[in-house]
Image: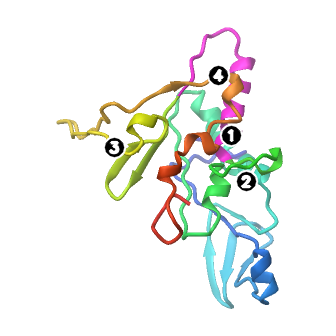
Amino acid sequence: VETGKSSECTPVRVAVRVRPLLPKETLHGHQSCVHVASDSRLLTLGHDHCFSFDVVLDQNANQEELYSTCVESLVHAFFQGFNATVFAYGQTGSGKTYTIGEANIGTEEDQGIIPRSLAEVFKLIDENEARDHTVRVSYLEVYKEEFKDLLEVETANKDIPRHQTPNLQIPLCGLGRLGAHRADGERWGAAEGIHPDQQRPPGSGQRD
């Protein structure tokens, strides 16, 4: 999938986002141990441990910059028939929930990847009136080898049955798909999609 302004095509891109210090960390005199180079592709840990990534966003990067740099092109490629996957990886408290957009945030500038992607989907649908589109959404949690449907209240606490087919596919039996409409665009991925019983305490390996 073409994932940038250049013609270079790569199957997987890795972006690193540096979380800014929290107020309590600043209060206690903590300092950041990472430095982002001016070309936004090199990150230095400590004094001399340098790492190169496709994209490096420093602590001043906002949600819009992250989305436009790392995700927007994938949404457009999706409309061209490509599959696309975006996932956040990091330790507890590193900002994954905020970045992805699962946190219950009311301000538009703080909206994460999920609500921004859905808004882009409906924008592209509006621009392509010649074709009919139907948008369906699933919300699946994989936690400790258990698969749970977070959009279905009755099954949110039940492990979804699954089996491996001869061609090595693993269909999820009963995973719900709900129709998404324009009015739902900003709500999907917010607190409505996460049942309270599914939220886990810090340090328990939760989706953070």
Q: Circle 2 is placed at which residue position?
A: 66
CA distance for labels 3 and 4: 27 Å
Mark toward the start of the polypeptide (3 vs 2): 2
Q: Amino acid at mark 4?
A: His
Say which of marks 2 and 4 sits in front.
4
- Magenta part mainly helix, strand or loop? helix
**C-alpha separation, residue under disc 2 versus residue under disc 4:** 25 Å
Q: Quadrant of residue 162?
A: top left
On the image, numbered disc 4 is attached to which residue?
181
Residue, x 23% and y 41% (percent of image)?
168
- Disc 1 residue type? Pro
Image coordinates of residue 108 in percent, x first then y, are 81, 44
**Mark 3 vs 4, N-terminal side:** 3
Q: Within 10 Å of the Cα at label 4, are there few (<14), some (14-19), or many (20+) other Cα atoms?
A: few
* Residue sticking out furthest to the top: 130
Depth check: give the residue in front, 178 or 68.
178
- Tell me what residue is drawn at x 38 percent, y 37 percent: 155
Pick the quarter of the image with the N terminus. top right
Image spot of residue 187 (x, y percent): 67, 36
